[in-house]
Amino acid sequence: MASTEQTNTEVGHDGGHASGVFPPFDPSTFGSQLLWLAIIFGALYVLMSRVGLPRVEGILAARKAAHEGDLAEAARLRAETEEAIAAFEKALADAHAHAEEIGQSTRDKLNAEIMARRKAFDAELTANLDAEEHTIAANKAKAMQNVGEIATESTIAIIQHLTGQTPSAADASAAVSHVSNA
Amino acid sequence: MAAESEGAIDPIHQFVIEPMFHVGGLTVTNSAAYMIAILVVATFVMIFGTAPKALVPGRLQSLGEVAYEFVATTVRGSAGHEGMRFFPLVFSLFMFVLIANLIGLIPFTFSVTSHIIVTFALAAIVILTVILYGFYKNGLHFLGLFVPSGVSPVLLPLLVLIEVISFISRPISLSVRLFANMLAGHITLNVFGGFVAMLLASGTWAVILSPLPFAMTVALSALELLVAFLQAYVFAILTCVYLNDAIHPGH
């Protein structure tokens, strides 16, 4: 250390190039320069290798991890979205199918009901028609019978009026039926 | 430029090492002060600048990250993945040389790397690392570095001799390349700058010629900026190449 100082002091006295030595080749400055280079380069190496470079490495690694994490997150979210879309479309299709089913079954049910009611109504109508026909037939027969009686009574009245004689009811009736049958 | 304006151009004066002040038993020379400045700048960028640890970096942090990635890419490309164990060394060398060169470009400053002893010491660190790690990792196989494979036995002694000379010349070429580039660049800049001052001070019709050396100074400054970066890069990449020899000595 002392010798370094010595050499530097000498350099100072010389006033540098005044001695005629080209400064970069002046050995009297070598000791001082090497000493300072050792101190400074040693400090630089320690600071860079212990602090600076690990820190930058950490920053770059963190950035890389963040980028990859973001990309993975984006991919995950996209997959989730696609899943949700698929689920929604499936639900929609199911709902469509279900609605179709409900509509069809309701239609079938209503058709069946209409058919049943129509049949019942038909049957009722037929029954009523038959009953009416029977009544008409009975009334007709009864009316025909009454026509015979009226004819007999009319015959009796006519004969009585014409001849003054009163025929028996049995004869008149026989005569009427004889005529009406002919 | 006061000295130059008196007449004589003295391009050597800028390389003189003078004591500035004393701290304890240590003499702080101008060279030492600039080395301290290098350490301060490197620390400012790489430690202060990266302190926010921001996911989206600011300017200073970007600068630190770019420096890291640039040197890391160089090391991986030249010395492979195993070479990354020397990454802090290569990075420190690169930053030291680069900042020294860039600071030296500021007018009236001193360039630490314009002294052969500094560049030689840096080259010696590289070569000693290569030799020590080469023997530590490969044992005597490291000497295989000097024996090219697939050569006829007649030529072998000659080739081994050439390989040995080439290996020995590595620290010399590594240090002289950087030193000579810085020295020559600064002398040239100083000479052309001195011409400007001389022409302006001449007081004759020659004053009108002064823009010519000034334009030259501007152009040379741009060139020196390129050289400053390029020499730092060359130093770093050659370090990687030499370290690669220590890691994989077989040809």
Image (cartoon, coloured by chain):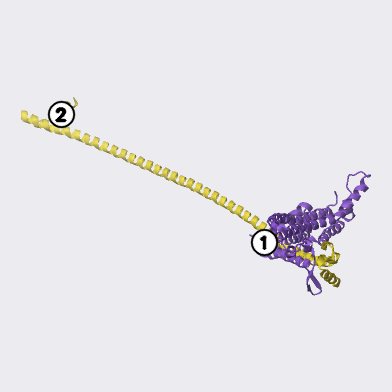
Q: Amino acid at mark 2?
A: Val
Residue B106's spot in the image, x, y percent? 71, 62
Q: Secondary structure at mark 1?
A: helix
- The crowding category of the residue bearing disc 2, from other C-alpha atoms within 10 Å (few below 14, some 14 to 19, many at least 20), is many
Residues indicated by labels 2 and 1 sit on the same polypeptide chain: no
Rendered residue at 82%/66% (across/down): A18
Mark nearer the viewer, 2 or 1: 1
| Chain identity for the colour yellow used in the image | A
Rendered residue at 92%/46% (across/down): B156
Whether residue A61 is visible here, answered yes or no, is: no
Mark number, residue A156: none
Residue position for label 1: B61
The residue closer to the viewer here, B145 or B105, is B105
Residue A130's spot in the image, x, y percent? 29, 37
The residue closer to the viewer here, B138 or A94, is B138
Distance from disc 2 to disc 1, alpha carbons, whole Å, reads 142 Å
In the image as oriented, which residue stretches furthest toward the right? B154
Residue B105's spot in the image, x, y percent? 73, 60
Mark number, residue A176: 2
| Chain identity for the colour purple used in the image | B
**Chain under label 1?**
B
Q: Quadrant of residue B168?
A: bottom right
